[in-house]
Amino acid sequence: METTASAIHIAEIIDIQSLKGVFNLTPLYADNDEIFFQLSEHKYLYAFKYGIICVYNFTEEETVALKQKIHPTLKGNVTKTTMAETIEVVTNANTFKLEFETITIPDSDSEKLRLIMLNLSQSVALDFYYNIAEKLLEDTRRHTNFLEEQGKLNISGKKLKRYIGKVLNIKNKISENLYIFESHELATDDEDLNKLNLELKKKFDLVDRHQIIHQQVDIVKENLDLFKDIMFHSESSRLEWIIIILIVIEVIDLIILKIMNI
């Protein structure tokens, strides 16, 4: 049987608890971060807290209808530009094989399909956070280039503090959501499932892409630390000059008073 699995980033957050109430079904797998349903024969839905759904054996029309159905469970910014990834899945084949755009497995076991959908969804999430990390690097590079050319920052005071706050919030979101990729290992003694899980991680290059994102965020954080040091030094120098000016004014006042009393 040949069909497709498609992972789509649709929102900033999906409320998993609310999603449970949308379908009058017992999930095949569920925790606080994700939920996996078999909606009908050979049709599956996997939804993740970090705003991604993965559908298996859905037509485009069925996917659109599903998005509308689960729309009330979406929180934060609903994605306008769709980020998605699709792969062909061949089941009930003679062999297990991973190719560039096709995954072939010997049966249609729901746990094998869940693993494929999980790793495909993680791949889309990594693309999403990679784009965010790249944008942060671009913004930081613009400020460091100005610092190199002009010898000062082109952002300071409240604007710099708000920028730092924005970056730290994004960093926290990335760390919180990508923690799943570090901790989510299939707890099973099934060698076939473990082998499939490892091969899928290699196929989608999840580990290396995950490391790249963390490296990008670390670079941004290093630059932010530099910006903060420059800002605090500048504010400290400004305060010193204010104190000096006040002392000078006080001395001048004393001199004037002495002259007037003579």
Image (cartoon, rainbow, N blue to C red):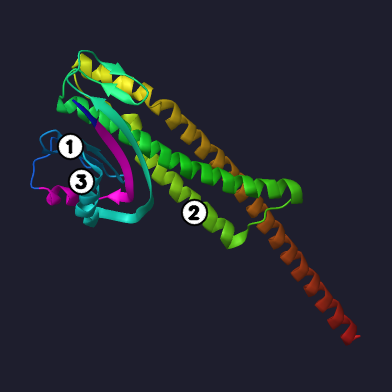
Do we see residue 21 in this rendering?
Answer: yes
Between 163 and 248, the one nearer to me in the picture = 163
Residue beneath the point at 19% across and 21% down: 188
- In 3D space, how far apart are the residues under numbered discs 1 and 2 (Cα atoms)? 39 Å
Q: Dot 2: few (<14), some (14–19), or many (≥20) neighbours within 10 Å?
A: few
Numbered disc 2: secondary structure: helix
Give the CA separation, mark 3 to mark 2.
40 Å
Q: Which residue is mark 1?
A: 44
Q: Which residues are magenta?
A: 4-23
Residue holding disc 3: 62
Residue 235, placed above or below residue 85: below
State yes or no: residue 176 in magenta: no
Q: Nearer the viewer, mark 3 or mark 1?
A: 3
Location of the N terminus by quadrant is: top left
Q: The disc labelled 1 sits on which kind of residue? A: Tyr
The C terminus, quarter of image: bottom right
Mark 3 surroundings: few (<14), some (14-19) or many (≥20) residues within 10 A: few
Q: Quadrant of residue 255?
A: bottom right
Q: Earlier in the sequence, mark 3 or mark 2?
A: 3
Residue 121 pos. (x, y %): 31, 36
Name the kind of residue labelled 3 in the image. Answer: Glu
- Give, as a three-letter code, the residue at label 2: Gly
Secondary structure beneath label 1: strand
